[in-house]
Image (spheres, grey):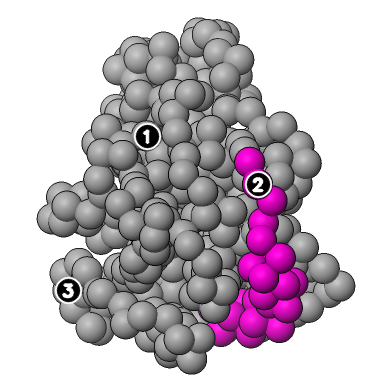
């Protein structure tokens, strides 16, 4: 594959200030979903569109999804397109798909998570990695193509909402209501990777989120015989869930980690404000990421069997009242498995060639446990690939991206747009 043309390389070499400017704008505007206590992505979308207009981007196309929970009544999905130039006018479009929303900052940050902090090569702030880096690297490549005036393939930049909370108002909405992608287009999602640039994600485990509710009988803690401890029942079940790893031991070397995972995560308050009260109700959530060979219905059945066993144990415990104890397991979200993108797909080979040219390393196809927009695309028959160069700090406290990674990834993306796959 030919190297990056010198004109394009020089433009990207001079993009550091633009990179930091865009990250400052994106980081300063929280784009949180309503279920995360936010008002959606429109303020960030408007500010970004203004910044891109100053870079002479073409006018955006807004493909908004109705959502009465936010002030504007909709969630923004933004499309920028750049027509191909001879001799590549009729080539498949290169799509770069990134998301505007972020997760809540959480506690423990060493600085304000919504003010960008430049620390050498690191840009620290909520969203700087997930997914601002993907937005900015794609924007820089798009901008360089605009300025260089070189022959290139058709390019599309799609910025979506609601990725962190299910995609119903983002890519899922677009797939259901708009015919955007051609059968031969190359779909790149810059939303996962490793620091070595060698991981091209072509498959994802299926997602299974479960809500576990325990209901007993509230009483004074000094007199357990007057109640039935719902928190203790939940704790017993959480401890027993570790055996799921033994019940479902299948492995697949394509994935990292190569096995299914079953992890208790969110634990909302159970309404008890005093230490001396036995709770009558409790809730916790379980995040399962399952290999294609792992049947989610069998996982749910195994958890229900554990729950029934704990119900029997606690019904026999003489220190508690003879009141009933119930444990209910319900599905919060479930993504069916999607066929993996073939390692021989044009999008994978094109990314591998560009990475080899820019980074000088051989990238390999892998599967991951995380869920990205690519899973939705694959379920619709589009062979998408996920790639970026990043430290694995998405959703972490003091999240950061690297300037050097963003610039080099922009070089890879520009390279992808110059040559046929």
Q: Earlier in the sequence, mark 3 or mark 1?
A: 3
The residue that appears at 48% across and 91% down in the rendered structure is: 54
In this rendering, position of residue 376 left or right of residue 187 = left
Mark 2 sits on what residue? 2
Mark 1 sits on what residue? 383
Give the numbered dot on residue 147: none
Disc 2 on helix, strand or loop? Answer: loop
Instruction: Say which quadrant the N terminus sits in.
Output: top right
The residue that appears at 69% across and 51% down in the rendered structure is: 3
Judged from this view, the residue extending furthest toward the front is: 87
Disc 3 on helix, strand or loop? Answer: loop
Judged from this view, the residue extending furthest toward the left is: 177
- Disc 2/disc 1 C-alpha distance (Å): 25 Å
Q: Is residue 237 above or below residue 197?
A: above
Q: Is residue 260 visible?
A: yes
- State which mark lies toward you, 3 or 2: 2
- Front-lying residue, 151 or 112: 151
Disc 1 on helix, strand or loop? Answer: loop
Please state the extent of the stretch shown in magenta in the rendering. 1-27
The residue that appears at 59% across and 80% down in the rendered structure is: 22
| Mark 2 Cα-neighbour bin, 10 Å: few <14, some 14–19, many ≥20 | few
Q: Is residue 365 above or below residue 77?
A: above
Give the numbered dot on residue 68: 3
- Disc 3/disc 2 C-alpha distance (Å): 50 Å
Image spot of residue 171 (x, y percent): 29, 54
In this rendering, position of residue 179 left or right of residue 26 = left
* Residue 130 within the magenta-colored segment of the rendering: no
């Amino acid at each position: 594959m030919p190297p990056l043309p010198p004109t394009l390389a020089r433009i990207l070499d001079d993009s550091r200030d633009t990179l930091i400017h865009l990250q400052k704008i994106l980081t300063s505007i929280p784009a949180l979903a309503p279920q995360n206590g936010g008002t959606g992505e429109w303020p960030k979308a408007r500010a970004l569109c203004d910044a891109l207009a100053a870079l002479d981007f073409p006018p955006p196309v807004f493909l908004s999804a109705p959502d009465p929970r936010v002030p504007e009544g909709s969630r923004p999905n933004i499309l920028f397109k750049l027509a191909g130039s001879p001799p590549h006018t009729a080539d498949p479009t290169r799509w770069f798909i990134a998301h505007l929303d972020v997760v809540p900052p959480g506690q423990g940050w060493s600085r304000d998570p919504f003010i960008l902090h430049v620390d050498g090569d690191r840009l620290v702030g909520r969203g700087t990695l997930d997914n601002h880096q993907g937005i900015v690297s794609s924007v820089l490549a798009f901008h360089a193509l605009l300025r260089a005036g070189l022959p290139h393939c058709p390019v599309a930049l799609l910025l979506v909402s609601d990725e962190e909370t299910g995609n119903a108002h983002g890519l899922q909405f677009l797939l259901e209501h708009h015919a955007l992608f051609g059968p031969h287009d190359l779909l790149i999602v810059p939303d996962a990777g490793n620091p070595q640039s060698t991981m091209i994600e072509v498959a994802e485990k299926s997602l299974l989120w479960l809500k576990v509710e325990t209901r007993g009988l509230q009483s004074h803690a000094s007199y357990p015989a007057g109640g039935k401890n719902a928190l203790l029942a939940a704790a017993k079940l959480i401890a027993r869930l570790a055996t799921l790893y033994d019940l479902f031991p299948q492995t697949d070397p394509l994935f990292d980690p190569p096995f299914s995972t079953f992890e208790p995560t969110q634990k909302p308050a159970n309404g008890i404000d005093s230490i001396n009260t036995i709770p009558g109700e409790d809730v916790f959530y379980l995040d399962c990421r399952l290999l294609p060979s792992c049947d989610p219905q069998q996982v749910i059945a195994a958890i229900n069997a554990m729950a029934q066993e704990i119900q029997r144990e606690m019904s026999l415990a003489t220190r508690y009242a003879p009141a009933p104890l119930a444990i209910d397991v319900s599905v919060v979200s479930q993504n069916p498995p999607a066929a993996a993108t073939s390692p021989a797909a044009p999008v994978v080979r094109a990314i591998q060639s560009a990475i080899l040219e820019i980074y000088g390393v051989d990238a390999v196809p892998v599967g991951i446990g995380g869920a990205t927009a690519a899973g939705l695309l694959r379920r619709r028959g589009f062979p998408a690939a996920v790639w970026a160069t990043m430290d694995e700090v998405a959703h972490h406290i003091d999240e950061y991206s690297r300037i050097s990674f963003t610039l080099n990834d922009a070089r890879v993306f520009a390279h992808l747009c110059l040559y046929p796959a």
